[in-house]
Amino acid sequence: MSSIDQPPVIRVEVPGHANRPRRTTVWVAAVLAAVALLGAGIIPRMQRSARAAETAKTASSSLANVLVVKARLTSGSADLELPGNIQALNVASIYARTSGYVQQRLVDIGTPVKAGQLLAVIASPEVDQELAQGRAAVEQARAALEQANANLAQARAQVNQANANVAQAQANEELAATTNDRWTRLVDRGVLPKQQGDERRSAFNARHAETNAAIAAETTAEANVGSRTADVSAARAAIDAQLANVRRLEQMQSFERVLAPFDGVVTERRIEKGDLISAGSGTDRNLFTVAQSTTLRIQVSVPQNYAVDLQPGQDAEVTLRERPGETFHGKIARTAESIAAATRTLLTEVQVNNSSGRLLPGMYAEVKFTLQRSHPVVLIPGSALVANAQGTRVAQVGQDRRVHLITVQTGRDLGTEIEILLGLSGSEQVINNPPDNLSEAQQVNVIESGRQ
């Protein structure tokens, strides 16, 4: 077949068709240029961001990681539990007041007794004999008093006789004086001889001497009355002395009966029938010990931090390990009103009713007080404290994540927690188990704790 037979090729020219590849190339180049420009701006920025993040990560990894907990402010009341020993309200060690042999022993340990009950009888024959002798001496003194009274009565009678003699002598003297005057005048007139005048004068002088003698006898009789009165007073004093001695011996004899001083229980007995005992508490051998255990007392040493919150009349709860599940209620009876310098504690006495007999003197007990605190107290974990040469401090973390070391005053150690009396307000974030190398204003990484 010849080429003449092939159909002719007709070419049709489409407008713009020749420029399409060129436009595509231009668009591709533009896109590539834009991508290149974007890459030139973004990639360095991304690199800088990556480097900054890497730097921050490196810086963050160089800070210390600390676990923080929030301090907790307690309520107005707080429980204080302290140990104490239970004691009987009254305890008496009974010693012998007279020497002798134990004739009877009527009680033993554990015996309940009443006040004035007979516990034992002591045979003391020496005291009995001295008492009989003392009573005889009293009778002898009374007889002496009767004799002295009789002598006094006789002396007073002698005074009366002396008074009568004086009166008679004075009357005789007056008569002799009158007669002497009369005879003197008659003699002077010459009516009577001088001899008779001299006789009357001599008679007057004799009567005057008799009067003086009677007066002297009267004075002697009165002095004798004074002496006999003194004898009566001495006899009465002797009776009083002998009676006092008898009363003393009667009291000593009454000590032969050993009596209970109050209601209670015999907790100790150290004698047997027939034992020889000596009087006085200087010996180391008491006869009995009696304890009054219907009311018990517990003495507790309260730390100074809580002394101001205790007042007589406050309630207290007493528990014992030997009585699980039981709580005994008591009240603060009194305090020493003084802080012991050696221990910085306040001695406090709690009294507990023991009419049930469930408590025994000598037991170890736990006493719990519910205190109304006069100031709020902050609680933090005990592991948050930093104690060194600078004192007791707490590491607080502020909003800027920097450490601030705060000096605090601690209170009770509650085991897992400890009380902070001064230094914290209760809103602080403190570091638990702080590292030893923490310093003021140091920046740290904070890890929150789950503690509320």
Image (spheres, grey):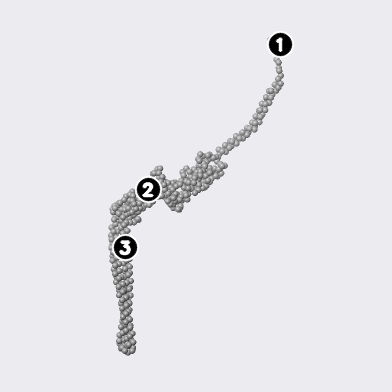
N-term-proximal mark, 1 vs 3: 1
Indicate the amino acid at tag 1: Ile
Is label 1 in a helix, a strand or a loop? loop
Question: Which corner quadrant of the image does residue 8 belong to?
Answer: top right
Q: Distance between the residues labelled 2 and 3?
A: 46 Å
322 to 215, vertically: above or below:
above
* Residue position marked by numbered label 2 in the rendering: 355
How many numbered discs? 3
| Nearer the camera: disc 1 or disc 3 | 3
Residue 13 is labelled as: none
Q: Residue at x 31, y 50 (%)?
A: 107
User: Is 233 situated left or right of 349 in this image?
Assistant: left
| Nearer the camera: disc 1 or disc 2 | 2
Identify which residue, 78 or 378, lies in the foreground: 78
* Residue position marked by numbered label 1 in the rendering: 4
User: Is 8 situated left or right of 385 in this image?
Assistant: right
* Residue position marked by numbered label 3 in the rendering: 243
Indicate the amino acid at tag 3: Leu
Q: Residue at x 29, y 62 (%)?
A: 135
| Nearer the camera: disc 2 or disc 3 | 2
Q: Which residue is drawn at 68% across and 26% down?
A: 26
For disc 2, the neighbor class at 10 Å (few under 14, some 14 to 19, many from 20) is few
